[in-house]
Image (cartoon, rainbow, N blue to C red):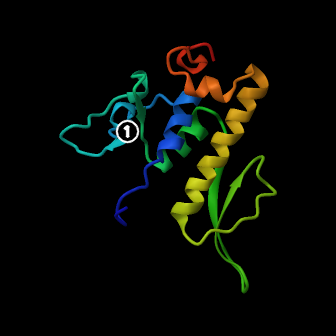
Amino acid sequence: MNDKQLQLVTFEQAKRLKALGFDWETYNFYDKLQDNLLCLNPLICFIDNHNKDKKKYSAPTVALALKWFRDVKNIDSGVERISHKDKRGWYLISKGFENYTDIFEDYESVESELLNELVRYELEKLERDKHITDRDLEDKEHSYFDSESY
């Protein structure tokens, strides 16, 4: 990643964001038909909600995915810098993660970990509320998440 570019979500994060209903437009996407190839070419990639296509996964920046959690899922979260004599680095903050104590050396790592935690939290909540299973996440033809019911 170039220092002047924002970090894109991983393929696994993109897949789970799609399952959670991420529907914002992005330029980049992962293509399931091409071994999960990440489309980065501005001549080929175009802004769209690529999650509408069953064979694609929108690939937002981690920052945009975190904004989606704040704006759509109403989950306040963020990262803060810590600097004490024996502890230096970044840590994540969010309601529900008060006991999370890992400290990261760089901002991008903690931001990606925060996204992982938010995705995990929301998937567990859906699993409890709707009895969603891993098979539902993988079943693209008849997935619960393709519906507009939530």
Identified at 63% across, 40% down, the residue is 119
Quadrant for residue 86, please give it: bottom right
Task: Say which element carries label 1.
Answer: loop
Q: Nearer the viewer, residue 73 or 124?
A: 124
Question: In the figure, 117 relative to 74: above or below?
Answer: below
Quadrant for residue 31, please give it: top left
Q: What is the quadrant of the C terminus in the image?
A: top right
- Where is residue 63 shown, x and y percent of the image? 49, 49
- Where is residue 118 shown, x and y percent of the image? 65, 43
- Where is residue 90 shown, x and y percent of the image? 63, 68
In this figure, which residue is indicated by the disc labeled 1? 35
Q: Nearer the viewer, residue 136 or 13?
A: 136
Label 1: how many Cα within 10 Å (few below 14, some 14–19, many 20+)? few
Q: What is the quadrant of the N terminus in the image?
A: bottom left
Identified at 60% across, 17% down, the residue is 144
State the residue lying farthest toward the right.
Answer: 99
State the residue lying farthest toward the left.
Answer: 43
Q: How many marks?
A: 1
Identified at 49% across, 49% down, the residue is 62
- Where is residue 133 shown, x and y percent of the image? 69, 26
Question: In the figure, 37 relative to 6: above or below?
Answer: above
- Looking at the image, residue 134 sits to the left or right of residue 49; the answer is right
- Looking at the image, residue 135 sits to the left or right of residue 7; the answer is right
- Identify residue type, mark 1: Asp
- Looking at the image, residue 17 sits to the left or right of residue 38; the answer is right
Identified at 49% across, 39% down, the residue is 14
